[in-house]
Amino acid sequence: MSNNPYETFIRQLENGAKVLGIGRDVVEVLKEPERVLEVSIPVKMDDGSVKVFKGWRSEHSTALGPAKGGIRYHWNVTKDEVIALSAWMSMKNALMNLPYGGGKGGIRVNPKELSDAELERLSRGFIDKIYKYLGPDQDVPAPDVYTNPKIMAWMLDEYEKLVGRKAPGVITGKPIIVGGSLGRNHATALGGFFVLREAVKVKEGKNLEGMTAAIQGFGNAGSHMAKFLAEAKVKVVAVSDSKGGIYDPNGLPIDEVKKVKSETGSVVNFDKAEKISNEELLILDVDILVPAALENVITEKNARDVKAKYIVELANGPITPEADDILNEKGIFDLPDILANAGGVTVSYFEWVQNRMGYYWDEEEVDAKLDKKMTKAFKEVYEAMEKYKVPPREAAYVVALRRLVEALKSRAVV
Ligand code: GLU
């Protein structure tokens, strides 16, 4: 009954491997990250003192290509968490058929307590420590929890100074002006929206109009998802962030809530709705539940009380394996993280491709290409669900593992 995300990953890997009947050697290889960098980053604070922060970059697998995945800044980041997140990236990138392995980075820091100048020094300091292992053909970071395009630009700039040449493809999720892709900011949410649309289509033969939704987490992924759902005439009745949630059974005015969040720092300051806790939000009687924050929010403690018909995992690892079993028994259609939030890395891939070509697409083109990729991945997962009679997460692992096994065999690793 552990909530260690690395142990969660191992269980998910074993489950997928069992369905496919793949050998122990492959499982043993994929259990371990290929390389984990652990660094300490001394940062001169604005008051003249020095603080030392711990950071990690884990490259879980490079069998399918350069390691790819974000860097998060969070006060609870641990090495095991970063390793698990990098392993989930390997699965996600394989499932999406991207030419990437999996990587992830993290710094143990509360970015809200740092000034902009301190954050910049921290971000540049992290790159100073790991740049030798990064590169467009080696390891390509991106944003994750509490990191953003501005931070990516600092990191890019530091990397380019150190290597003495321009290398826009070394990092994705950049501001447009330094080689970012249109459509990257909303990509995680839009990808989740596309797979939800497909799931409702195959299950109920209808579109999303008239359904209700609750969204836990109102950062980049959650807030864009709220907008896409509202545009599809879904009633978004509840949203929350780390400070708490708000609820209105008639549907929240998303643009107004967004404004309050950006002006005051939290959705709880929107005063035209009832206040609810994050725990209450997760068990609301809605059609669609979207965990869009951190790991382990649905556990064996609250899974039985979840009432949603569909779950869209915009967060990585929001559901523990015990909770997974309960949700499956209840017949909830849970779109797993490695599928549901893969829109972000998919448009990161498009960004990297555009950087390499030096030729840039308009937003419609990016969104349309994302739709195609997400719909295809959903179909592959759905086919595996039917073929092996397994729930969506196991099916997604099956599709991903097939590609990883083939790559490991071609490279004669196994
Ligand atoms: N951090 C995002 C994820 O977990 C995006 C990674 C990327 O774009 O490389 O998928």
Image (tube, rainbow, N blue to C red):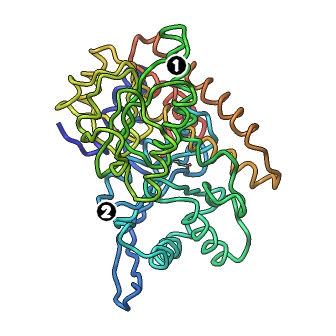
- The correct choice, above or below, for 32 with respect to 208 in the image is below
The relative height of residue 240 versus residue 235 in the rendered view (above or below) is below
Q: Which of marks 2 and 1 is nearer the N terminus?
A: 2
Question: Residue 81 location, x and y as percent?
Answer: 33, 51
- Tag 1: residue type? Leu
Give the residue furthest to the front: 272
The residue beneath circle 2 is: 75
Q: Residue furthest top?
A: 205
Quadrant of res 237: top left
Disc assigned to residue 389: none
Pointers 2 and 1 in contact (C-beta within 8 Å): no
Name the residue located 48 percent from the left edge and 18 percent from the top edge: 210
Tell me the quarter of the image containing the N terminus. Answer: top left
Report if residue 73 is visible in the image.
Answer: yes
The residue beneath circle 1 is: 208
Q: Which residue is at the front of the view, 191 or 381?
A: 191
Q: In this view, does 411 lie above or below 34?
A: above
